Image (cartoon, helix red, strand yellow):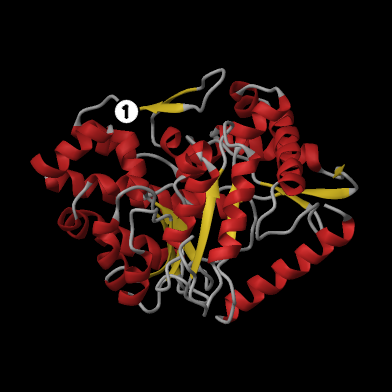
Amino acid sequence: MEPQEIESHNLAVAHLWEHFRAGVNERVPVTFATDEYVWLNLTGHTFREFYTDPRVQLDVQLAGQAWFAETVVHDQRLGPPAECWTVVPRFWMDECEGLGCEIVVQENDFAWERPVRADKGQLLRRLADLDPREMVLGSRLWGLYEAMRNLADGMTYRDLPVRIYFPGGGTHGLFTVTCQVRGAERFCLDLKEDPDFAYELLGLVADKTLARIRAWHELAATGTELPMSGMWGMADDALQLISADTYRRLVLPHHERMYSAMTSGDRHMHLCGYAQQHFEALYHELGIVSLEGPGTFVDHGALLEAMPRLRLGAQCDHTVLMLGPEAEISRMMRGMLSDAARKPGRFSISGFLVRQTPLEHVRAMYEAGKRYGVIGDAVETP
C-alpha cells in the first residue's frame, strides 16, 4: 500500500473502534492474530531456542510483530506502532510448571506438560505448600522477563523504543490449568467419582493462581492494586469438556471468587470450542459481559438477543480460513454476519493465522467482512 493509503486506512480504523466503543459503528470490525508458530517459520529459529534463549525470543517477537503490522490488512493499525514496540515474554506452560508439572520443551513444536504424578492426598498437600513468590522467581517465565528487560534497556527497533511488559497478570483458566495438573481424563473422572476432591483441588488451584498473580504484580512493581477497577478476564477452553450442571456445582463458585478478587469492573472470558452449554451461567450467574471465542457453530444473533449486555468477539473457522477456497470463506463470513448479529458496539470477528494460511485467504476474509458487515443495511446472499 502507498503511504497515503496506509494513513487513510489507519484513520478509518481508529474511527471504527472509537465508534464501536460508543456503540455507533457502521460496520462489524474484523481482525486477525497469530503467534510464534508463524514467527519462527519466518525467522528460521526453533521453538526450543524461542523458549530458552531470551535474545532469540525478543528478536523473533519483534520481527513477527513487524511482519504482521506490515503485511496483514485488517481493522488494526498498519505499519509500526505509534510510540513503542511492546513485547510480552511468553512461556505457555508457566502456570502448570509452577504447580508441579514436568514440561517437555520440543525442538520444533510447542512445549507441553506432563500431569503431576501423585495420589490425591499428595497432590493437595503439594499444592498447599507452594510459596507464590518462589513459584514466580523460580519460573522460566520470570527468567525470560528479567533477561528481556535487560536486553531491551535503551534498545530501539526500527527507530522506536522497545518496552517489555510483565506477563503475569492472568491465567489460561482455572479448569484448564487443573486439567493440566491432574490430567484431563483423570480429572474428568474425579468430577464424577469424587466431586469433593475435585472441588477442593479446583479451590487450591484458584488460591495459588490468585497468589501467583499478586506475586507477579509485587515483584514486577506494577503498582496495581487488586481488585482493579477495569476489565479483567481469563480463558478457560477446557470447560467444553463438562456439562452445565457440573460447571455450576464445582467450578462456578471458584470462578466467582477469582473474578471478585481480581476486578470490581467488567468481566471477560475467552472460550474456544463447543462451550455454549455454559453461556447462560457465565452471563447470568458469573456476570461475564465480554465473551471471546464462539465459533461458526454458535448462533451469534440469538446469543446477543438473549443477553442484552453481552459484547461478543466471535472467531471464524480457522480451518476454512486456511484451506479456503475464497468462495467458501465468503460464505462463512456471510453466515456469521447475519442481520441479528450485526449489533453496533457488541459484535466483532477474528481469525487466526497458522503457517499454512495463505495471505490471499486473509484478504478474502477481510474483504468479505467489509462487504457483509455493514450495520443497518440488509445484505443479500451472493
260 or 207: which is nearer to us? 260
Q: Is residue 116 above or below residue 164?
A: above
Label 1 environment density (alpha carbons within 10 Å; few <14, some 14–19, many ≥20): some
In percent of width and height, residue 275 lies at 29, 53
263 or 38: which is nearer to us? 38
295 or 336: which is nearer to us? 336
In percent of width and height, residue 27 lies at 58, 71
The residue under label 1 is which amino acid type? Val
Q: Secondary structure at mark 1?
A: loop
Left or right placement of residue 139 versus residue 257 in this view: right
Per the image, the residue denoted by label 1 is 116
Q: Residue at x 65, y 41 (%)?
A: 359
Q: Residue at x 40, y 78 (%)?
A: 309
User: Residue 286 sits in which quadrant?
Assistant: bottom left
User: Residue 311 sits in which quadrant?
Assistant: bottom left
User: Residue 67 sits in which quadrant?
Assistant: top right
